[in-house]
Amino acid sequence: MQNSQANESPTTTESAEKGWFDKPGNIRMLIGALIVVCIGLVLADFMYTNDHPYFAWESMFGFQAWVGFIAFVVIVFLGRLLRPIVRRRENYYD
């Protein structure tokens, strides 16, 4: 009688170790740290005064944070529009 377990190869999920980003606790810790840093940067805006703004709205509270967020959203949507142009077949480089 042949041992059926000897012929089986381990699956890739069993043989590969989990990475740092594969553990849910690490992801929660990373998101929590990001939130703390973002809140700290917005609170730091209380200590910074822009004495010579070029435009009046530059002296608004949290202006840099809003501009950064809006720029991020615009870049993501432009990327979605460019996807059909730069997309290649799955086996393009084979």
Image (cartoon, grey):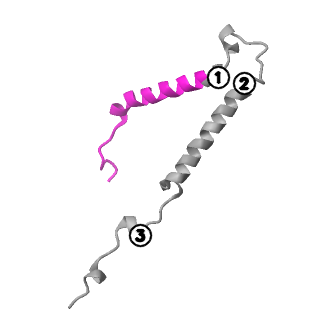
Q: Nearer the viewer, residue 91 or 38?
A: 38
Q: Position of residue 86 (x, y in %)?
A: 37, 35
Amino acid type, residue under disc 3 in the picture = Ser
In the rendered image, which residue does mark 3 sit on? Answer: 15
For marks 1 and 3, give the CA distance. Answer: 47 Å
Q: Position of residue 57 (x, y in %)?
A: 65, 11
The magenta segment:
66-94
As for residue 61 lying within the magenta part, the answer is: no
Q: Residue at x 25, y 82 (%)?
A: 4
Amino acid type, residue under disc 2 in the picture = Asp
Amino acid type, residue under disc 1 in the picture = Gln
Check the picture and name the quadrant holding the N terminus. bottom left
Q: Residues within 10 Å of mark 2 (few under 14, many from 20)?
A: some
- Classify residue 38 by image quadrant: top right
Q: Residues within 10 Å of mark 3 (few under 14, many from 20)?
A: few
Q: Residue at x 62, y 25 (%)?
A: 65
Name the side, left or right, on which 79 lies relative to 89: right
For marks 1 and 2, give the CA distance. Answer: 9 Å
For marks 3 and 2 on the same chain, the one whose residue lies earlier in the sequence: 3
Dots 1, 2 in contact, CB < 8 A: yes
Name the side, left or right, on which 54 lies relative to 51: left
In the rendered image, which residue does mark 2 sit on? Answer: 45
Q: Nearer the viewer, residue 28 or 91?
A: 28
For marks 3 and 2, give the CA distance. Answer: 49 Å
Check the picture and name the quadrant holding the C terminus. bottom left
Q: Position of residue 21 (x, y in %)?
A: 51, 53
27 above or below 42? below
In the rendered image, which residue does mark 1 sit on? Answer: 64
The kind of secondary structure the magenta stretch mainly shows is helix
- Classify residue 59 by image quadrant: top right
The mark lying in front, picked from 3 and 2, is 2
